[in-house]
Image: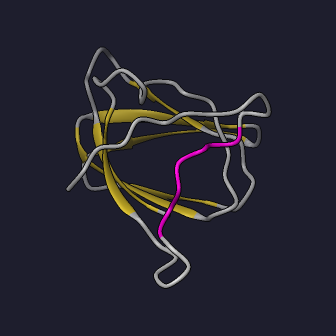
């Protein structure tokens, strides 16, 4: 599975293309140890499902925070500002479906 860094514009909208017109979905492995993934506050039009596969991460949104451990997941709605932050120095890894 591929890793793609998160890049944003001046409104914090993520610039990564999630899928194509023919297949409007993407799945990536996000590694919080990688530059361009750790604590990048952003939003996108696509909904997102994130599943922690290694370590832990705190997902922060304006509505609140949740800490995920390996095997746990979260659903983020379209347009929600969010970021994933490692917990206790762990370099978490999660699968991200947009």
Residue furthest out toward the bottom: 22
84 vs 14: above or below:
above
State the residue in front, 86 or 11.
11
Highlighted range, magenta: 13-19
Query: Left of 20 or right of it: where is 29?
Result: left
Q: Residue at x 50, y 73 (%)?
A: 20
Q: Position of residue 93 (x, y in %)?
A: 27, 40
Query: Left of 54 or right of it: where is 97?
Result: right
* Residue 16 inside the magenta-drawn segment: yes
Residue furthest out toward the front: 21
Q: Position of residue 19 (x, y in %)?
A: 47, 68
Question: Which quadrant would the N terminus be assigned to in this image?
Answer: bottom left
Q: Main secondary structure of the magenta part?
A: loop
Q: Residue 48's quadrant in the figure?
A: bottom right
Residue furthest out toward the right: 11
Name the image colouring.
secondary structure
* Residue 20 inside the magenta-drawn segment: no
Q: Residue at x 41, y 66 (%)?
A: 26
Q: Residue at x 63, y 34 (%)?
A: 8
């Amino acid at each position: 599975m591929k890793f793609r860094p998160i890049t944003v514009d001046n409104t914090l909208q993520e610039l990564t293309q999630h899928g194509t017109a023919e297949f409007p979905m993407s799945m990536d492995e996000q590694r919080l140890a990688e530059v361009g993934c750790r604590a990048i506050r952003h939003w996108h039009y696509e909904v997102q499902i994130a599943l922690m596969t290694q370590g832990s991460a705190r997902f922060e949104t304006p509505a609140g925070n949740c800490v995920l451990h390996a095997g746990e997941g979260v659903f983020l709605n379209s347009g929600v500002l969010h970021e994933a932050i490692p917990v206790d120095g762990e370099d978490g890894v999660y699968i991200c479906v947009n």
